[in-house]
Image (cartoon, rainbow, N blue to C red):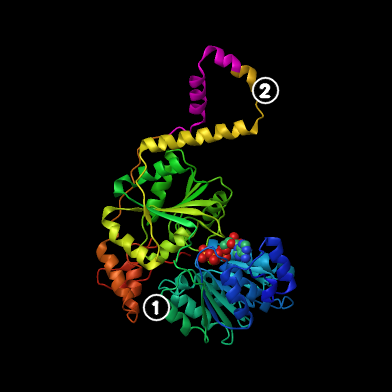
Amino acid sequence: MTTFKELGISNPIMKALEKMGFEEATPIQKETIPLAMQGNDVIGQAQTGTGKTAAFGIPMIEKIDPKQRRIQGLVVAPTRELAIQVSEEVHRLGKFKGIRTLPVYGGQHMERQIRSLKEGPQIVVATPGRLLDHMRRKTIRTERVQIAVLDEADEMLNMGFIDDIRNILKGIPEDRQTLLFSATMPKEIRDIASKLMKDPKEIKVKAKEMTVENIDQYFMEVPEKYKFDTLTNHLDVNAPELAIVFSRTKKRVDEITEGLQARGFKAEGIHGDLTQGKRMSVLNKFKHGRVEVLVATDVAARGLDISGVTHVYNFDIPQDPESYVHRIGRTGRAGRTGEAISFITPREMAHLKLIEKVTKSKMKRIMPPTNQDAQRGQQRIAVDKLLKTIEQKDLKQYHETANELLQNHDSITVIAAALKMLTKERKNTPVRISSVAPISVKKAQRSKDNKRRPNNKKRYHGKRNQGGRNQGGGRNRKGNFQKRRKHD
Ligand SMILES: Nc1ncnc2c1ncn2[C@@H]1O[C@H](COP(=O)(O)OP(=O)(O)OP(=O)(O)O)[C@@H](O)[C@H]1O
Ligand SMILES: [Mg+2]
């Protein structure tokens, strides 16, 4: 066990850690915090949900002088929601040192943002597009930035963001310290990364698998047209506390969301076409349990830390193994357990094997639940509710009425009626989801080929963004590579 004290962390941060309930440093924190505090550039790779935010947040805060009201630390993150979340965690870590942290992201009022920037934050956590915008307007000045972090570094250095990142880093003094963190780091991307850094120390927390072992991984072979019924049946059987359903396109996210609502689930969708206000309100409702099923594109795949997510569904299997790792990593965080269930159409079985191979993990085959299983599942939940009420023992005031009932009806009938009332009524509203082409074996094969061809970066990126990514992009008819639309 390594305590934070042993890592040489100063008192104000120790106080914050205590308040946050962090007792022991996680392996990535233990290994990277001292290195980063000595001033090294660091590439840190560790599984999802293992505390990478504090691993870069702590050394960043240590380096900052709270008396200087200039931006000294900059974190770049791929999505707006992640920028907000990271900013909140960095704020919690730095508040006893008097550090001001500000999230800056697209979709927010420019004027309001400029006003907040004038208040002199020392740390800014930003999405790349909006950050560049501010840098051009000189409303964000980077000449005093001493430490820059790319969270979700492999995503930030992927085709959709790489030019922006290069431009951002060009604007920061060369003697800066650069930290890169992610749960995944394909070799090709790591090579690009090292060129932007100075003699980086690479820390990879050793794990047998790329995924966290406390996530149980399953797959079901389901033809496209049965996916939706399978999803609602599985939700009925398992009654997740909070579940995230990932789909490939924005259109399907909308359709699945509407379908789930029609069948009585508290579901909302999130994707890049929604207004920022809507995105925030959906996420907040989900965090507070007012929405139980969040249907999302990959915009919610990376970094989001929402406690209580017990199930992740891949309604559509992702194109990249890396994306699979991040998606399922929305559950099983900070030592908790979770389940990931991927729907694989018969033609996608080869792709499943590819994901298993790259992530070095195995998905266990389970059979799709039937309508009858779903019904029984719902009844079991009703029974659980009844048993809990029995345990509470506070039932005396009902005894007289219960006796009266039993004089006129047999006990089985009375209990069955009570269960019927407690059981969620299953709606069978027909739902049609417009279909998408399966991720083909050929594409999966090409992906393997490209991984063996690390020097051919252009092909590699083109492939990575082809078709399957929900954010659009891919190869056009002439074979040119289009830029994938960014999350932000
Ligand atoms: N040392 C610690 N002790 C207890 N909890 C911790 C510790 N470090 C981080 N956490 C908590 O663990 C959760 C996951 O942390 P974090 O979001 O930083 O993970 P991550 O490694 O960045 O995951 P991802 O790869 O998905 O972005 C957060 O709720 C965080 O507050
Ligand atoms: Mg993270």
Q: Residue furthest top?
A: 408
Q: Quadrant of residue 439?
A: bottom left
Q: Residue at x 56, y 87 (%)?
A: 174
Q: Quadrant of residue 134?
A: bottom right
Residue labelled 1 has its Cβ within 8 Å of some atom of ligand 1: no
Identify residue for label 1: 188
Q: Residue at x 34, y 82 (%)?
A: 455
Position of residue 354 in the picture relative to residue 170 (left or right): left
Q: Nearer the viewer, residue 270 or 278?
A: 270
Q: Answer few, some or many: residues within 10 Å of disc 2's Cα (few below 14, many 20 plus, some between 14 and 19).
A: few
Q: Nearer the viewer, residue 470 or 361?
A: 361
Q: Which residues are magenta?
A: 403-426
Q: Nearer the viewer, residue 413 or 227?
A: 413
Position of residue 314 in the picture relative to residue 204 (left or right): left
Question: Residue 353 in the image: x percent, y percent?
Answer: 32, 62
Question: Residue 488 in the image: x percent, y percent?
Answer: 48, 65
| Total numbered labels placed on residues in the image | 2
**Residue 106 is inside the magenta segment:** no
- Label placed on residue 397: 2
**Residue 413 is inside the magenta segment:** yes
Amino acid, disc 2: Gln
- Label placed on residue 333: none
Res. 329 visible in picture: yes
Which quadrant of the render holds ligand 1? bottom right
Q: Answer few, some or many: residues within 10 Å of disc 1's Cα (few below 14, many 20 plus, some between 14 and 19).
A: some
Q: Which secondary structure is most common in the magenta stretch? A: helix
